Amino acid sequence: MPDISQTILRIVLVSGAALAIGLVAAFGAVFFVDIITYLNHFLLPEVWMSDGRIDWLTVLLIISVPVSGGLVAGQLRRLVDGGRAHGPAEVIELAQLGKGDIPLRNGVFTALSNLVWLGAGASAGQYGALVHLGATIGGALGRVDKWLREDFRLPGPVALGCGVAAAIATAFSAPIAGVVFAHEVVLRHYSLRAFAPVTIAATVGYLVSFWLFGRPPLFAVAVEAGAHPLAYSGFVAIGLLGGIVSLLYMRALLQAGKLADKTPLPDSLKPGIAGLVLGLIALGVPQVTGLGVEAMQSVIGSADFPLAELLLILIAKLLATAVCVGYARIGGAFAPALFIGTFFGAIIGGIATSALGGDLAEPAFYAICGMAAVT
C-alpha cells in the first residue's frame, strides 16, 4: 500500500505541476499574441493606406513606426544577458544540458523586445518568442517545487517542454503540434516521464485557446474537391523548387547577419536601421509588414492574384525578413517562411494552371504545399 500511495501522490503532484505550467503559459501566449495583434491593428501601413491615398504624413508614419519600434526594441534587448534576444536555440541548449533554469530577466526582456518589434510591424515571426516565453514560464514554475523529493518533481527539461508545448498548442490551437514540437525539437526524446506532463500542458493550452477564448485555427482552409491527377506535377515542382527557395531564404538571413556584424554601429541601434529599410519597402509593398495572416488567407482562398504581384510580394517579403530577422536579430523566421511558402505555392499553382489548362486543384492545395516545402 505505501508504494501505491507514493505512486499516486507522485502522479498527482507531477500532473498538477504540468497543469499549472500549461495554464500560465497558455494565458501568457494569448496575451502576447493579442497585444501584438492590437498594436498591428493601429500601426501597420495598410491601416493608413486603406483609403488608397498616400500623403506626406502617411509616408512619415509608415517609416517612423518601425524605426521607433526598432530603437525601443534594441534598448530592451540590451538588458538581456549577452545583449541579444534569446529564442528556441537557448531553450534547446538548456534542455540538452539537463537544466531548466532560464533567468527570469532574460525571459522578460526577450519577450518585451519581441513584443515592441513585432507590434511595430516587423517582418518577423512571433513563434520563436512564444517558445522562449513558454519555456521561461515552465522553468520558473518548475522551480517552485524544489522542496519536494526529486522523484516527486518535474525534471527541469520537462518543465521547459511543458511550457513550450502549452505555448505552441495555444498559438496554433493544435495540441498535437505542441506535444510533437516539445519532444522532437526541445527534449529530443520520448519517455513516459516526459510524455504525460507535456501532453497535459499542451491539452490545457489548447483548451484555454479554443474553449475559453474561442480562438480559431490560424488558417481557415475549405476544400470542396480533390485535386486532378495532373495537378500532382505542380505539387512535385513545388517540392523540388521549394527546397531552393528555402535555401535562398536561409542564405539571405545569414548574409544579413554578416552585414550586421560589419556595420560599425552599436547593436542596440541596428533594429532601428532595419526598421528604416522595412518602412521604405512597405511604401511600395505594405503586405510585407507583420505576420501577414490576412494576405496568406487571401491567397489560400483565391486564385485571382496576378503572378507578377505574387512574385513582387514574395521577393519583398524575403528581403524585409532578412533585414528584420537577420540584421536586427529580433523575432523568429518560421512565420515569414510560411508567408513565403504560401506565395511561392500560389505562383507555381498559377503557372501549372496556365500550362496544363483549367483549374486542376483548388488554390489551397498549392499554397499549403508551398508552406510545407519552404518550412
Image: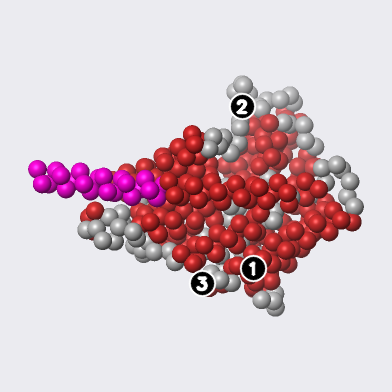
Residue placed at 35% from the left, 57% from the top? 142
Q: CA distance from mark 1 to mark 3?
A: 13 Å
Name the mark nearer the viewer: 2 or 3. Answer: 3
What kind of residue is marked 1? Gly
Q: Mark 2 sits on what residue? A: 222
Residue 2, percent from left and from top: 10, 46
* Magenta stretch contains residue 21: yes
Q: Which mark is residue 81?
A: 3
Q: Quadrant of residue 275?
A: bottom right
Q: Which mark is residue 74?
A: 1
Q: Nearer the viewer, mark 2 or mark 1?
A: 1
Q: Position of residue 113 (x, y in %)?
A: 60, 62
The prevailing secondary structure element of the residues shown in magenta is: helix
Left or right of 307 on screen, residue 235: left
Position of 346 with respect to 282 (left or right) is left
Q: Amino acid at mark 3?
A: Asp
Label 1 CA crowd tier, 10 Å (few <14, some 14–19, many 20+): many
Q: Decide: marks 2, 1 in contact (CB < 8 A)?
A: no
Visible residue check, residue 184: no
- In front of the other: 11 or 89: 11
Q: Nearer the viewer, residue 285 or 357?
A: 285
